[in-house]
Image: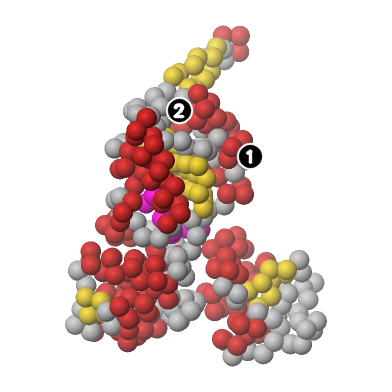
Amino acid sequence: MDAYREQLTKSDAEFEKTLRPGQFSDFIGQEKVRERLELSVAAAKARGDVMDHVLLCGPPGLGKTTMAYIIGNAMGSNVKATSGPILAKPADLAGMLTNLSPGDVLFIDEIHRIQKNVEEYLYSAMEDFAIDIVLDQGVNARSVRLNLPKFTLVGATTRSGLLSAPMRSRFGLTNRLDYYTPAELVRVVIRSAGILGVAIDPDGADEIACRSRGTPRIANNLLRWVRDYAQVRADNHITRPVADAALQMLDVDRYGLDEMDKRILTTILERFGGGPVGLNNIAVSVGEEPGTLEEVYEPYLIQQGWLARTPQGRVATPKAAQHLHATLPPAGQGYLPI
């Protein structure tokens, strides 16, 4: 059930790649971000120069990686991709930087997870297009400056607050991608269905979009499941009833809440009287890591008003109690963590 939340498998990545737009005109949603980036690309090409470095922030699945590749295509440049956790040593970063060609786009996903000693190498690379490498050790140590071709760094992060101030200040453009509206996701689903060659009604696309948590990646993954369901049980035609039946089988309700979401809310409501309750208590009760709850599940639940975070702990809202047919205790009589 939670497979679409986890790290993409090879087949998932290939699936997503086939649906990924390759130019700004095909990218749905994020109009302000798209307009700013289009303008920057046009200005850089007119000057015959590289773009300013770009930082893309926002929850996973909203199109940060896609936007990086669109920038590369629009600039007519190659995109060299890596991720923060992979760059464990300065030598790893130096190897990538020295292999860049003039005008290339270097895309670093989860850039907030770069080690501090590696991050410092990026400072001179981003500002001066050069890095200093220390050769030998002790009394024979000497510093050699390597000039780099001019490039554009595109960094993506789901937690911009973890980026250091010196790193953030070196990006010329900082853009935040927000959750999509249902209407935008309907367009995403219809476009993806066309690429996949499956017939879909507008109502069927709307049913999938409303359960996609404002996230195109989830919408595309749910579409793949509904496509399989329709292929076997509905003559390869997705209507609203077909989409509803398929997503009920997947335990995704009409609000986009899945099995783990409901387990979290039910645990707070039934075991802890609606809260407040500490994160560790919830994690133990539902059998999940606290970090996963905080980074993966809570943002959507809080944004949509199912859960509240207070100094005393997490609290289920009346909206959650009504949806799950539970009763909240009178104000001030909830569970108090020890």
What's the residue at 28%, 65% (across, down)? Answer: 192
Q: Quadrant of the C terminus?
A: bottom right
What's the residue at 27%, 74% (across, down)? Answer: 227
Q: Nearer the viewer, residue 330 or 259?
A: 330
- Up/down of 296 relative to 74, above or below: below
Picture quadrant of residue 278: bottom right
Per the image, label 2 sits on a secondary structure element best described as: helix
Name the amino acid, label 2. Ala
Mark positioned earlier in the residue sequence (2 or 1): 2
| Numbered circle sitting on residue 115 | none
What's the residue at 45%, 52% (across, down)? Answer: 33
Find disc 2 in the rendering and name its residue: 94
User: Residue 281: horizontal and vertical position, in percent?
Assistant: 68, 71
Name the amino acid, label 1. Ala
Q: Nearer the viewer, residue 126 or 311?
A: 126
Magenta-tinted stretch? 59-69
User: Residue 235: horizontal and vertical position, in percent?
Assistant: 19, 82
Find disc 1 in the rendering and name its residue: 165
Q: Crowding near pointer 2: few (<14 within 10 Å), some, many (20+)?
A: many
